[in-house]
Image (tube, rainbow, N blue to C red):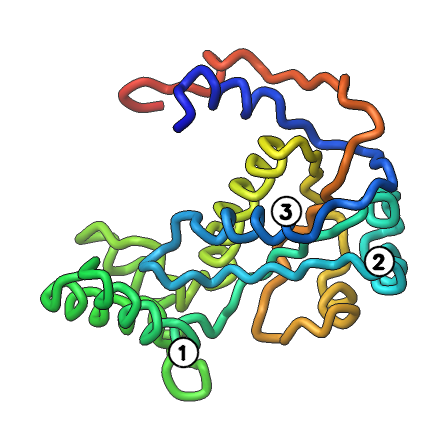
Amino acid sequence: MLNIDEFEELVRTRRSIRHFRPDPVDEDLLHRLLDIAHWAPSGYNLQPTHMVLVTDTALKKRLHIACMKQAQILEAPAIVVFTGDKLVVENNLESAFQADRAIDAISAEYEKQLRGFIKLAFDQGPLGLGWFGKAFFVPLARLFTPIPSIPAVEKRYWLAKQVMLSSMIFMLAATAAGLSTVPMEGFDEDRVRKVLGIPSSHIVALVVPVGYAVDNSIRKSRLPVEKIIHKNGW
């Protein structure tokens, strides 16, 4: 297991790379990195993150256009597109509970409580219109009691948080494997979805080229940490 010094070095070493060598990346290694990313924390253990691995040259050319013709898409031997499933409760809830029960990771009482909260938080009602009521009720209720963000109202925001947890672990794992990555937000989501046949029920949150860097000596900087740490309040 990494100690804190080794982990700090790993995080400080990761760079966003602008240019990649054409050297191929072993597909078994790529699948291992994706499996590692799959173990990221997940709200309610629903696991909404999906990952589309793109290595086909023809597909990368089409993806290149959808990603504003950024060079990394064509240069990197592999691209990972991270998506979030808006229908995750319908698609994953029962399977997730079944898996937890199989390893005694959840009690019957906690499962009952979690089912109740998930229904309240995610249910959008008939025709998906139930979020209107939640959008009106939640700000009102917060005047009297603390209420967490409700995915039924802020589904895209909730999904983006979940996906980013997985994508960051993927990028750190790639660094540990001697690879380089760059998280890209500059893309036309609808075009990316069309190129890769991603269902409309998914958001496309991030595109991550992965491969071997042309230049590993790239430096990065950060503002003084004192500017962002607020002790016991802002």
Query: In screen coordinates, is 43 left or right of 144?
Result: right
* Quadrant of res 170: top right
Dot 3 crowding, Cα within 10 Å, few <14, some 14–19, many 20+: few
The amino acid at mark 2 is Lys
Q: Residue 54: percent from the left, percent from the top?
A: 74, 59
Asked whether the residues under the numbered discs 2 and 1 touch, taking CB atoms below 8 Å apart as contact, a structural biologist would say no
Viewer-nearest residue: 144 or 95: 95
Quadrant of the rendering where the C terminus is positioned: top left
Q: In the rendered picture of this protein, how many numbered marks are placed on residues?
A: 3
Q: Which residue is mark 2?
A: 60
Sequence-first disc among 1 and 3: 3
Residue 29 image label: 3
Q: Which residue is mark 1?
A: 90
Dot 1 crowding, Cα within 10 Å, few <14, some 14–19, many 20+: few
Query: In screen coordinates, is 230 left or right of 146?
Result: right
- Between the residue at mark 2 and the residue at mark 1, the CA separation in whole angstroms equals 32 Å
